[in-house]
Amino acid sequence: METHPEVWAGVECTVNRVGERYFDQLARNGHHDRPDDVDRLAALGVRAVRFPVLWERVAPGGAPPDWTWSDARLDRLRALGVRPVVTLLHHGSGPRDTSLVDPAFPERFAAFARAAAERYPWVEDWTPINEPLTTARFSALYGLWYPHATDDRSFALAFAHQMRATALAMREIRAVVPGARLVQTEDLGKVHATPGLAYQAAFENERRWATVDVLAGRLAPGDAFWEYLVGPGGIAPDALRAMVDAPCPPDLVGINHYLTSERFLDRRLSRYPAHAHGGNAWHRYADVEAVRVLGDGCDGPECLLREAWERYRLPIAVTEVHLACTREQQLRWLRTVWEAALRLRADGVDVRAVTAWAALGSFDWNSLLTRDEGFYEPGLFDVRGPEPRPTALATMVRALAAEGRASHPALDGPGWWEMPERLQYPVARKHAVGRPRTRGRLALMAPPASAPRPVLITGARGTLARAIARACRGRALAHVALGRGELDVADPRAVQAALAEHRPWAVVNCAGFVRVDDAERERDACWRENVCGPAMLADACAAGGIALATFSSDLVFGEPAESARPFVEDDPVAPRNVYGASKAEAEHRVLSRMPEALVVRTSAFFGPWDDWNFLTIALRELSAGRPFPALADVTVSPTYVPELADATLDLLIDGERGVWHLASAGALTWHEFARLGAERAGVDASGLRPLALDEARLAAPRPRWSVLGTARGPLLGAVENAICHYLRARAAA
C-alpha cells in the first residue's frame, strides 16, 4: 500500500428539482460553458475526477440522449490520463416525466445507464446514484425536493427504487463493461442523543448504513431498518428480500462526511431555537449540529471511516471533502480528513482516495438548494471572476497529490470545530448516546508545539486594523497588531526591527493618514504616512519573502468618463485631492517594488464595532430626533468592514497579488445610504436632510461618483444584505 491515498477532485453537480423548477449547479458554477475546467483539475495532479453524466441533463423530459457535452469533457479527461468516476444521478429525481416514487423509475434509469456504458465503454468506475438514502430523505421524508413528500411510505419507496435502480444499472453497465466497478457514495453521519432519545438515535445510526447494507446483502428481517421498510414504509417483504438476496456490493465505499452530518437530539426544547424543533410520533425534540453541543468533540471522520471499515471490510474512499467557511478553515478541514486517512492507512484500513469536493464551489447549499439566492461557497477555484481563480485549496491539493503533504502558515491554527467558541448551546458531556467506541474522535486540538508565525497588522488603533485583528481572532490566525508608537511604518529601522522580532508570514498594512480634508493642509504628513510607509513595507517584505496587503481608496478616481459606470481595477486613476493622490502614488510605489503585493481599494466603511462611522452616527442622530444632513449628490460604495476584513484575509491566504476592488455591491448616495439604514432599522428618517456637495464646503474636492466595481470577481455581498448583518451585529453587541 502506498504511503498516502490518491487525491481525487469533484465538481458539485447537483441537479435537483423544487416544484417545477430544476436547480442546476453546473449552470450556476459555469462548468456547463467551460470545457477547459477539466484541464484545470488535471493540472492539480489528481488521479480521478467524480464526473457527472446526469440523466436530467443528457435526456431531459424523456428526450433522446444528447451526449455532446459529456463527450467533449470525458474525451479530454481520457486524453489527460485522469480517470472519471461517472455519476448518473446526483440528488436528482430524473427527467420531468418520472420521480423517485414512480414504479417505472428503476427500469428507466437502468436503460439510461446501459446507454451511458455503451457511449463510454472505456469508463470503469461508476456511481449510478449519489447518496440514495440522503436523497430519499430530502425528497420524500422532509419534502424539500421533488416529489416533496413527507411520509414514511414515500420515503421507503424513494429509497427502495434507488436501490433497485442502482443494482439494475450496474447489471446493464457490466453487460457492456464487464470489469466495471461500483463506487457507491453516501453521507455517513451519526446521531448522538440524551438518554430519553436513545431509541431514536439507535434507529438513525442503523439507518445511515442502509445504502451499503442493501447493496451488500446485509439487511435482514429483525434489523430495525428492515422492520421500518416493511412496516410504516409498506415495502413488500418479498420485494425487499429479492433485493438483498441478489446483492450488488460496492467495489469501493464512498464516504461523504460534513461537519453538520453529526447531529444531537434533545427533548429540552427551551435550550434551542424554534427552527431546530421537530420530533417523531412519540416525542418532540430538538435536532442540532452535534459540534455545537458536545463539549468533548464529535466523532469526526477518522472514527466514522473506521466504523465503515469494521462493518464492511471493503475499500473506502472519502468522496466529498468540503467546508463552507473562510479559507484557512477550508484548508484545516481538508488537512483533518487527509491526516485521518493517513493514520487509518497506517493501521491497515484500506482508504484508497480523498476527494476535494466542490472544486468550483457551490451555490445555495445553505438553503439545501431550495432557494435561488446566489449564496456562493468557493472551493479549489473561485468562479466569481472572468475565469475560475485558484484558491489556496488548489495549491494544497496539488501538493497533496504530488507529495502527500502540504504546508501553509494558515494551517497552524485549529479548526473552528476544535475551538470552545463553536459551542452555541448548553454543553452536553455526560450520558450522551452514540459516543464513539473507536479511536480518533474529533476533539479539541492540543496547543501547538511552537508558536505559529503571525500576521502583523499595522495601525492597530484604526477601524480597519481592529476589524482585521478581530477577524484573525475569530479565524484562529495568529496575529500581532502594532500601533504607531510601536511601529512607525515610514521608519525603515522600525520596520526591520518589527519584522525581525515578530517573524510574520504576512503584513496587513492598515496604518495611514485618513483625514481627507486635513490632508489638504497637511500634505507632508499625509504623504509620509500614506506613501512612504507602504513603500518601506514593500521593500522590507519583498526582501524577506513576506506577503503584504495594503489598502487604497476609491478617491484615487475622478469623475468617470462614462456616466454611472463603476470603476474597475484597471481604470486609470485621476485623484482630485491630496488624500487620493497619496493613495494613487502608494499603489504605484508598492507594486513597482513588490509586484506580488496585494493592494485593496475600498470605500466608505461601516461596521458594528465602530461608533463613529457614517451609518452608526446617522442612526444615532435620527433615533434621538435630531436632524441629520447627508450628501445627496455624491454616490459611493458603502463597504461592510467585517466582510472586507474576511475577504482581504482570504485573498492574502490565496497568495493573490495586484489591485483588487473590495466593496459591498451597490451604489448609493450618502443620503440614500442613511435612509436605507433607517428603514432597515425601523428608525424614523424624517430628520434626514439632503445636502449638496457644493453646500458642504469641504476642504478637499470630491468626485460625485466613486463607485467601485470589479473585473476580478465580486467577493462582497450586496450592501442591502450588509446593512441587515450590521443591524443584527449591533443588536447582539
Image (cartoon, rainbow, N blue to C red):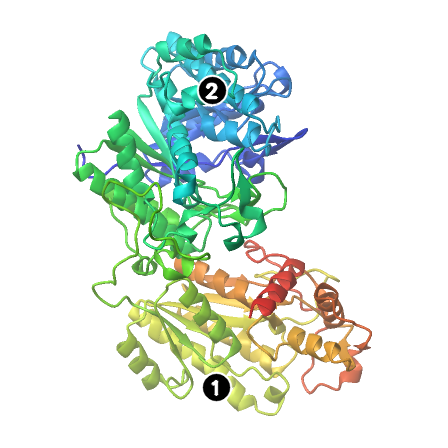
Which amino acid lies under the numbered mark 2 shown in the image of this protein? Answer: Leu
Q: Secondary structure at mark 2?
A: helix
Mark whose residue sits in front, 1 or 2: 2
Looking at the image, residue 364 sits to the left or right of residue 531; the answer is right
Mark 1 secondary-structure assignment = helix
Residue 229 shows which numbered tag? 2
How far, Cα to Cα, is label 1 from label 2? Answer: 75 Å
Asked which quadrant contains residue 121, the reply is top left
Q: What number is the disc on residue 450?
A: none
Q: Is residue 158 above or below residue 585?
A: above
- Let me know if residue 6 appears in the view: no
Q: Where's residue 589, x and y in %?
A: 46, 74
Amino acid type at circle 1 is Arg
As drawn, 497 above or below 351: below
Percent x, y of residue 563: 75, 62
Q: Earlier in the sequence, mark 1 or mark 2?
A: 2
Identify the residue at image location x=20%, y=63%: 449
Q: Nearer the viewer, residue 620 or 223?
A: 223
Q: Is residue 520 left or right of residue 300?
A: right
Which quadrant: the C terminus? bottom right
In the displayed structure, 261 sits above or below 270; it is above
Name the residue rendered at 50%, 48% in the picture: 377
**Side of 284 relative to 183 (left or right):** right
Give the numbered dot on residue 528.
1
Dot 1 and dot 2 residues touching (CB under 8 Å): no
Image location of residue 298, percent across then percent down? 34, 47
Q: Residues within 10 Å of mark 1 (few under 14, many from 20)?
A: some
